Image (cartoon, rainbow, N blue to C red):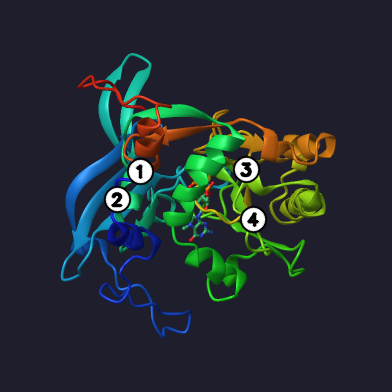
Amino acid sequence: MSDSNSQNDEFLEPKRKECKIEHKDENGVSDSQLELKDFVLEKILNSSTNRKTVCVLGKFKDKSGVAIVFLEKNAFREEDLDNKGYFSVNTELKKFFQNDIYGNFECFPPASINGVKTTIIYPATDKHIAKFSQQQVHIVLETPELYDKLTLPHLEKEQFNLQWVYNILEGTSEQDRIVHDNKCEREGFVLLPDLKWDGVTTETLYLLAIVRQRGIKSLRDLDETHLPLLRRIRDEGKKKILEKYNVAGSQLRIYLHYQPSFYHLHVHFTYLKHEAPGIYAEKSHLLDTVIDNIEMIGDYYKKATLPFTIREMDNIFNIYETNGHVQRIKQENIELIDK
Ligand code: M7G
């Protein structure tokens, strides 16, 4: 480990006391006092022309600590493609040129359908900055021995704070967003829209099932004792999404990440046609496959070699590098890969 303990403490617990954000509930008692007009840009961490996203680092005036602001242009919603939406009198059309039958314009639709999805992380830690920065990525093949020797000690020392997960499970945050709540302590879970989803646009549907049982860190911990829980997440999750969003189970990609960012077991539900971040082969494991593997071999995930990606700014990279499992790219100006 290259980090001192004090740095690790900061990863685990951002300095909340020094950087208070005020919160308001629906009754106006408190709400985030952060305003984008007070944001002072320091650095662009990542920008994707494909995804139409940009992630920047900066500070809010008169506030200590740094903030990450993540902006994402929304997908088009079918219901906005009418004379109240894009084709309304309030939409301005600016002409660039017309050539024969070919016209090129920029259109300014009404502000109400032209929002930009915005995620603010404040105060952000060095680990958040690393997560959202564009950087070199490598694959390592993690055997059970490497998990015990390198990965587990690292994540026991340093991982993202899980307070947001406990807030959901304990009923203090995002309660109005909950789609389904199975309160069984052992096999229960909460299903709700992911941070990355606006909760309405079916084309980008993204929900998260967070298990109630504590202590299951990731895929690695799963065995035959978890089968009832996993089947319940799959079956109840599909049913509730069909009821609420009219999306069939066969149109859902249901998967776990390895490695996850947050070590409290959760399952991702995304719309199959939506290319959500983290759906690639090196990171996602379909829940059906996970269930099937465990049904065949109860301790499959305790025996399997699991590939995962590590990025050069992650501290775990140093650990795998020191132990000779991965090599840092020395070339300068090499093209960076989007997360
Ligand atoms: P992951 O597999 O641990 O990591 O997924 P990833 O970020 O590499 O995918 C955690 C998931 O939790 C991600 O899809 C996040 O967007 C989502 N998420 C993170 N936070 C902090 C929140 C939150 O506060 N609320 C909700 N609803 N989702 C969150």
Q: Nearer the viewer, residue 294 or 79?
A: 294
Which mark is first along the chain, 4 or 3? 4
Which residue is more in the foreground, 93 or 129?
129
Residue 171 left/right relative to 137 = right
N-term-proximal mark, 3 vs 2: 2
Q: Which mark is residue 216?
A: 4
Disc 4 marks a residue whose amino acid type is Ile
Location of residue 67 in the rendering, given as x and y in whole percent from the top left corner: 27, 58
| Disc 4/disc 1 C-alpha distance (Å) | 22 Å
Tell me, for residue 265, which label it has, or none. Answer: none
Cα distance, mark 3 to mark 1?
22 Å
- The three-letter amino acid code for the residue at tag 3 is Leu
* Mark 3 CB within 8 Å of ligand 1: yes
The alpha-carbon separation of the residues under discs 4 and 2 comes to: 26 Å
In the rendered structure, the answer to whether residue 52 lies left or right of residue 162 reads left
According to the picture, the residue beneath numbered tag 3 turns out to be 256
Q: Residue at x 34, y 57 (%)?
A: 8
The residue carrying mark 1 is 315
Please, what secondary structure does the residue beneath circle 4 have? loop
For the C terminus, which image quadrant? top left
Count of numbered tags: 4
In space, the residues marked 2 and 1 are separated at their CA atoms by: 8 Å
